[in-house]
Image (cartoon, rainbow, N blue to C red):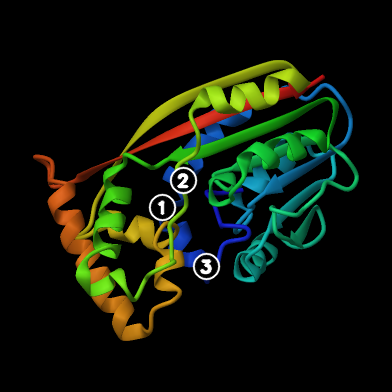
Amino acid sequence: MTEAKPAGQAGTWDADTYLRYAAYRARPMEDLLPRIALSVPGSIYDLGCGPGTLTRQLKDRWPERPVSGIDSSAEMLRKARQSYGDGAISWQQADIATWRANPPAALVFANASLHWLPDHAGLFPRLFGDVVPGGILAVQMPMTGQAAYHICLHHVKNAPRWRERLAGVEPHDDPHPAAFYYDLLAPFATDTDIWETDYHHVLTGAHPVTDWVSGAALVPVLSVLNDDEKAEFIADYKAAETAAYPRRLDGTVLFTMRRLFMVAKRA
């Protein structure tokens, strides 16, 4: 599982572009995984599995359990099958907004996917309800609302050149505060662990932030533009990036992302 491919979100996802920063995108998973202690038998579901990199880690950690990677993107699932085959892991194309665990889950794992979906007040209790007693819901979501790259996207999208052309095309909303999710899950949990972490990624290249968001946040916008418009929009975004992300003394860019984590054990 890797950072999000948006189930239920329009857009064509390019696995190779997304994997450009695979090591950095895997860091939250590496921090989340050790917090999960499975004590009941049952299946594992990776929601928004993308090209399957981290789904493979779930299988490696729990080799005796059935593991399924769920994603809405046929391209991402093609990459997952190409890399990891169809034997040890079941790959399923589905929309997380309507997906149900069958059979019920010992672990529902969602690393940077649920922030693409609306109605978290309904979504999170439904997903937690598909977890067996003693099982785990483990979630990580980027907190993008105040992030410079997300502010750049809104500024460019709402500039006179693009305002009308991109009307109705919205990047994902920021997740709710931690207390919102605690209040949703705690009534059905014996234990709820919730925290936030800032990641400061050191990036290199001419426009590394644009390269990063081209694999995720820009996809819903670029998917409605023709090739000439895409090139123009990306050029505008690169200009915004240059102003928002000054170079450090060594020529790198410090790209900060805050992420929200939660691990809830079902009562």
Circle 3: residue type: Trp
Is 98 on the left or on the right of 198, as rendered? right
Describe the element under mark 2 as helix, strand or loop: helix
The residue labelled by disc 2 is 25
Q: CA distance from mark 1 to mark 3?
A: 15 Å
Is residue 35 visible in the rendered image? The answer is no
* Residue ID at (27%, 62%): 158
Circle 1: residue type: Tyr
Pointer 1 or 3: first along the chain: 3
* Residue ID at (54%, 22%): 179
Mark 2–mark 1 CB contact (< 8 Å)? yes
The residue labelled by disc 1 is 21
Describe the element under mark 3 as helix, strand or loop: loop
Is 88 on the left or on the right of 71, as rendered? right
Camera-near label (2 vs 3) is: 3
Task: Give the image location of residue 115, x and y in percent.
Answer: 54, 45
Is residue 70 visible in the rendered image? The answer is yes
Q: Residues within 10 Å of mark 2 (few under 14, many from 20)?
A: many
Q: Is residue 68 above or below residue 108?
A: below
| Image quadrant in which you'd find residue 29 | top right
Describe the element under mark 1 as helix, strand or loop: helix
Q: Is residue 68 above or below residue 12?
A: above
Q: Quadrant of the C terminus?
A: top right
| Image quadrant in which you'd find residue 227 | bottom left
Identify which residue, 10 or 196, lies in the foreground: 10
Task: Give the image location of residue 10, x and y in percent.
Answer: 55, 67
